[in-house]
Image: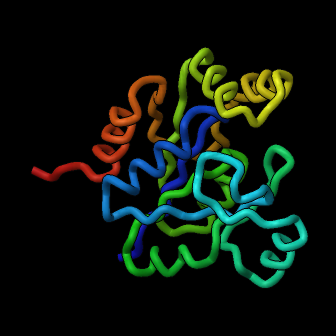
Amino acid sequence: MSGRFIAVVGPSGVGKDSVVQAMADRDQRIVLARRVITRPSDAGSEEFDGVTAAEFQSLKGAGAFTLSWEAHGLHYAIPIAVNAHLKDGRDVLANLSRAVLIRAKDRFARFDVINLTADRDVLAARLAARGRETDTQIAGRLERATAGLPGGIEALHLDNSGPLGQTVQAALDRLYPVKA
């Protein structure tokens, strides 16, 4: 049986990178998709491959990505290598944009979504702490925080306002229920 592609989505500052890393660290059934992003590799809290816009377009043209999208003025992609993990029956976990969910659902035979939320004050504090955006950019991200999922997308909704471990355990419990 093929593995599942599990998309983790939610507003900026909700903790997607922390949740996906902790889930992959905790459960060997999960492979973490390492995204390719048009931003310097030393920027951000996640492990990713930073490339220039020209390099991104070259890779995309060469078929190196199974999924790609634009968000917040950057280009993002999931490398084609994740398909081998799925074929081997491993579950692949990826931080995605809500805007690309329909394409991802159409692309992967087994597809699940975890939609993370958090209190507005928590989001604001996390965005300010990471120091990547201006106050105006943070305000814009907070306005988009309540955006819903596209029609036809079902998701596991989890509040990540509290302890990371609590969110991670809730996600793993739902993805891998213990059978009696």
Q: Residue furthest right?
A: 54
Pick out the residue farthest to the left: 180
In-image side of 16 versus 128 (left or right): left
Horizontal arrangement in the rendering, residue 62 relative to residue 107 (left or right): right
Q: Is residue 161 above or below residue 17?
A: above
The image position of residue 122, as x and y in percent, is 57, 20
Q: Which sits in the foreground, 37 or 88?
A: 37
- Name the image colouring: rainbow
Q: Kindly identify the residue that appears in the image at 40 percent across and 56 percent down.
A: 24
- Coordinates of residue 58 in the picture (x, y in percent): 85, 78
Whether residue 77 can be seen here: no
On screen, residue 76 above or below 122: below
Which picture quadrant has residue 78? bottom right
Visible in this render: residue 23? yes
Residue 61 in percent (x, y) is at 83, 80
Residue at (78, 56) in percent of width and height = 39
Q: Quadrant of the N terminus?
A: bottom left
The answer to which quarter of the image holds residue 164 is top left
Task: Name the one closer to the observer, 124 or 4.
Answer: 124
- Residue 76, position in %: x, y? 74, 59
Residue lying furthest top in this view? 121
Q: Residue at x 52, y 35 (%)?
A: 116
Q: Residue placed farthest to the bottom in the image? A: 62
Please give the name of the residue rendered at 69% of the width and 30% of the height, measured from the top-left corner.
Answer: 147
Instruction: Return the residue nearer the eye: 83 or 128.
Output: 128
